[in-house]
C-alpha cells in the first residue's frame, strides 16, 4: 500500500531523525487497533535522498510480521529507487532488534546487492522513539555476514583475497627492513583470520572439508588447522 506524504513531511532524507519524523506520523495515523500490529514499510529514494515512495510491505500480528524479500524491492525496481530504508514498528515498545529482525535484514542486504540497490538502514520505531541499525553498528555487522551469500561468491572472495595477499607479500618481501617484516607478519595473520571466516561460511553452507581443501589447493589437514579442528 502506497503511503502519501503530507505537506508537513520533508521530501528529502538527510538523517535518521528525518526518517523517524515521517514514519512516526505515519504510524500515529493508523487506528488504535492497527498501531498494535507490526508493520513493515520501505522508503525508496534516489541517489540524492529525495523520497520517491513509501510503501507498506506487510502488516502482521502484535509480535511479528511475515516478509517476502522480493516484495520488499518490487516497487523499488519499478520506480528506479537506488537507495532504500526499512522501517518497522514494535508494538511492545521495545527497541531491541530480535534475531528475526537481524536475520531478515541480513537476507535483504544480499537481495539488494543482486538488484544493485543500496539498503542503507533499518529502523525500529515506536510512537515515542526509534533505533537505527546503522547508528548502533548492527548494519555494518550484517553487511559483513556471509550467511546468505551464495557459495560461489564465497569461493570467489577466497580466491580474490589470496591473489591480493600474494601481491602484498611480494611487495613486502622486496623490502628487507624490520618494519616490512612486521607488516608481512600482520598480513599473514589477517589472511588466516579472514580465511577462517570464509571456510566456516562454506561449512555452514554444507560444503565438505574435502571440497574446501580442493578449492583452496591445500590439504584437508591444513583446512582443519585453520579452523582449529583435530
Image (cartoon, rainbow, N blue to C red):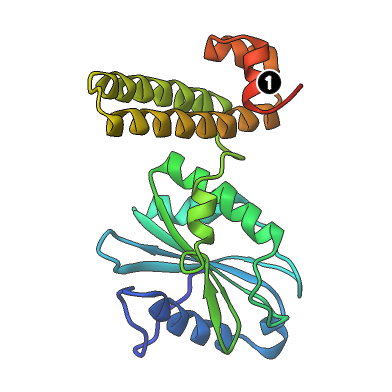
Q: Nearer the viewer, residue 177 or 6?
A: 177
The structure residue drawn at horizontal position 29% and vertical position 69%, both measured from the top left corner, is 50
SS label for mark 1: helix
- Please give the name of the residue rendered at 63% of the width and 57% of the height, measured from the top-left corner: 102
Q: Nearer the viewer, residue 74 or 154?
A: 154
Quarter in which the C terminus is drawn: top right
Query: Mark 1 — residue?
Result: 224
For residue 179, say whether it is visible: yes
Please, is residue 79 above or below residue 63 in the view? above
Q: Position of residue 88 (x, y in %)?
A: 59, 70
Q: What residue is drawn where x is 67% and y is 29%?
A: 205
Can residue 66 be spotted in the picture? no
Please report the residue visible at 37 percent of the width from the left and 57 percent of the height from the top: 83
Q: Residue furthest front?
A: 178
x, y percent for residue 19: 43, 76
Where, by quadrant of the figure, is residue 90 drawn?
A: bottom right
Amino acid at each position: 500500500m502506497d503511503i502519501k506524504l503530507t505537506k508537513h513531511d520533508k521530501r528529502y532524507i538527510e538523517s535518521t531523525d528525518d526518517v523517524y519524523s515521517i514514519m512516526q506520523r505515519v504510524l500515529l495515523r493508523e487506528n488504535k487497533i492497527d498501531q498494535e500490529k507490526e508493520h513493515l514499510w520501505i522508503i525508496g529514494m534516489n541517489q540524492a535522498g529525495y523520497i520517491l515512495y513509501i510503501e507498506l510491505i506487510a502488516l502482521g500480528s502484535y509480535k511479528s510480521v511475515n516478509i517476502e524479500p522480493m516484495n520488499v524491492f518490487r516497487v523499488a525496481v519499478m520506480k528506479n529507487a537506488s537507495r532504500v530504508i526499512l522501517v518497522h514498528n514494535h508494538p511492545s515498545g521495545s527497541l531491541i532488534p530480535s534475531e528475526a529482525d537481524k536475520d531478515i535484514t541480513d537476507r535483504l542486504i544480499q537481495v539488494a546487492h543482486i538488484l544493485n540497490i543500496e539498503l542503507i538502514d533499518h529502523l525500529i520505531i515506536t510512537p515515542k522513539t526509534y533505533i537505527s541499525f546503522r547508528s548502533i553498528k548492527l548494519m555494518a555487522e550484517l553487511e559483513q555476514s556471509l550467511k546468505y551469500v551464495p557459495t560461489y561468491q564465497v569461493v570467489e572472495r577466497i580466491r580474490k583475497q589470496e591473489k591480493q595477499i600474494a601481491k602484498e607479500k611480494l611487495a613486502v618481501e622486496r623490502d628487507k627492513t624490520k618494519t616490512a617484516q612486521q607488516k608481512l607478519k600482520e598480513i599473514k595473520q589477517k589472511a588466516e583470520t579472514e580465511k577462517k571466516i570464509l571456510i566456516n561460511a562454506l561449512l555452514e553452507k554444507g560444503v565438505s572439508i574435502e571440497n574446501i581443501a580442493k578449492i583452496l589447493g591445500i590439504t584437508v589437514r591444513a583446512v582443519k588447522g585453520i579452523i582449529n579442528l583435530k
